[in-house]
Image (tube, rainbow, N blue to C red):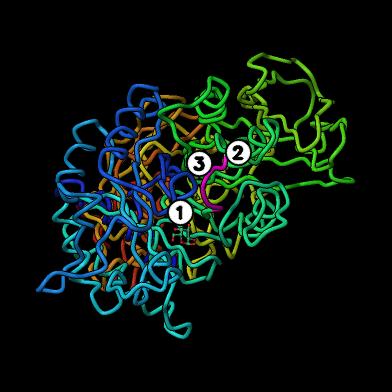
Amino acid sequence: MKVAITKATLAAAFSLLTMSFAHPDSLVLTPPMGWNSWNVFHENINENQIKEIADAMVESGLKDAGYVFLNLDDNWMDTKRDAQGNLQNNPKTFPSGMKALADYVHAKGLKFGLYGDRGKRTCHHYNSNWQSESGSNGHEEQDAKKLAEWGVDYWKYDNCDSDPNTQEKDYTAMSKALRNSGRDIVFSICMWEYKEWMPKIANLWRTTFDIGPAWISQSWYRGVYEIIDANNKYWQIAKPGHWNDPDMLEVGNDGLSYEEQRSQMTMWSIMAAPIMISSDIRKMSNETKELYLNKDMIAINQDSLGVQGHRISDVDGKQVWTKPLKNGDIAVALLNNNSSIQTVECNFADIGVEGEVEVRDAWKKKDLGPVSHVSIELPAHGSALLRLILKPVPRAPFKGEALAIPGKIEVEDFDVNGVGQGNTTYNEKDTENHGDSDYRPDTGVDLYKKATGVIVGYNQAGEWLEYTVKVAKTGTYTMNASVASANNTSSFKLSMDGKDITEEISVPQATTGENNYDEYNTVEAKVNLTEGEHILRFTVTGDWMDIDYIKFCENESCEETEEIRMTIPATVRDVSPRLLKKGNAMFIEKNGKRFDLTGHRIK
Ligand code: GLA
């Protein structure tokens, strides 16, 4: 099922860490940043120029700011394959070959990307009507091996001169080939539209046709705003490792006003879009450099929660966009899509933020807060990029009923900011760990409905849940927890009022099926508890696991028993003994100890 597969792939990413390559899902956990040759140089690329770009990426500080991919787009390759059918570099423009160039780029601490096409010819070779063998159709395995041999880290795969009926098949073939190539290669689909099969096989996919240097295009290409609008539709698809790609930056090239360039940065940041510069950075202006290197802008784009921000209001072209961030802050973009000056406002209460909060303005590089509202005058197509700094909400006093111990604690009944148990909701459709709904703040855990009831799934190391419990009387209790994992490295522990009450408890690995997170096992531990109200905390200490309930029993065992009437032997008669039946066996229980029917202690 979907939950298990996704989780399994993440779990696999962990186990593969010991090997020399990572799982494809974990290759670009934040949107890739770098440089691409197409929008600035088009087909006119060559070895020296690319080396100079590599030098400039390092010297300008772009590399240190996170722009690490140096990607060659179309026309690095020869029109002819070699005698064995291998792709090869254009010998005139790249005389030293791709391996040497990749080595140069790697030596600078950068990553090296190339471009190819799923059809017979790449777009430039096809559009130029050249006789060419530059497309990878039918050569997927061979080409992926070659890329790995050269040291390629990123492969953009275009859509020209191809069969419209074999899109999924062709892109899947290349995805598999890259995954079999023995090298970590980011897979970037360029098919000019999103299809639902893409996230399964690729790290990023172009959501639109080519971008060009205009806000609204009067030409064959798409304008920046048209692309923003189109890319927004898919905001719920993006997640760590898998990104919508609204194409390269036009920042630093002619065509857009300075405000429009800044707005492209603002919107690429809030949309968690890959940021691929495509200008001649060997001679960039200070203004352009400032746009690329703005730390607040980059931090919002690269936030590890990996949620793509989206538009929440548009009143006569005055737009508000929001993006939740990992530490609980919220990024807000204000965009004026009009061709005249407008004041764009945002009442924080409208985006669920009560009271006054600190606000950091990324472009003005200053703090505006504490405020509960902003009202900013923006020029035509101008924007503001803000971070609302939300202090962690202190744990409000618990108002509900404490959960009784002895008793069974359904794991979903955790305290939610003092609202109390039983008020938690779960999302039946939530099959992925997005941490964006129905989760205990600071934990990132997700609730799922499964055959066994509601469980808390996707728990990973460091995540925790708290319960307000009331222990009836001081003593030793038997704790049972119902847990599931496909790994043999999952574990958890319990603490009370900040002190551990168990050691790390291992979660048994499922014995049936592959990547099975539905096989529940009971694990047991003895715990010493003191009478009264306490905060019980369940903390995950190992790999992914699911949990259904935690049970505390006064007896040696939590097994279900049935009380029956019978004469009690004198040896155990005095202090409220109980006669119990489990299956066909009968025994007496007194003070938590068990005796057979003749009064002898059972171990
Ligand atoms: C297509 C792509 C562009 C670029 C060119 C190269 O148009 O969408 O991004 O790669 O091909 O020919």
Q: Mark 2 against mark 1, which lies toward the viewer?
A: 2
Q: Secondary structure at mark 1?
A: strand
Which of the marked residues, 2 or 3, is nearer the chain's N terminus? 2
N-terminal label among 2 and 1: 2
Indicate the quadrant where residue 232 lies.
bottom right
Label 2, label 1: how far apart the Cα atoms are:
61 Å
Horizontally, residue 253 falls left or right of residue 138, namely right
Residue at 58%, 22% in the rendered image: 287
**Separation of residues labelled 3 and 1 (CA atoms):** 28 Å
In the image, the segment drawn in magenta is 246-250
Residue 118 location, x and y as percent?
Answer: 36, 72
Dominant SS of magenta comes to: loop
- The reply to whether discs 2 and 3 touch (Cβ–Cβ < 8 Å) is no
Quickly name the residue at label 1. 549
Q: Which mark is residue 254?
A: 2
Mark 3 crowd level (few <14, some 14–19, many ≥20, 10 Å Cα): many
Query: What amino acid is at disc 3?
Result: Leu
The residue at the point 81 percent across, 23 percent down is 372
Q: Which residue is mark 3?
A: 305
SS of the residue under disc 3: loop
Question: Amino acid under label 2?
Answer: Asp
Name the image quarter holding residue 467: top right
* Magenta-span inclusion, residue 145: no
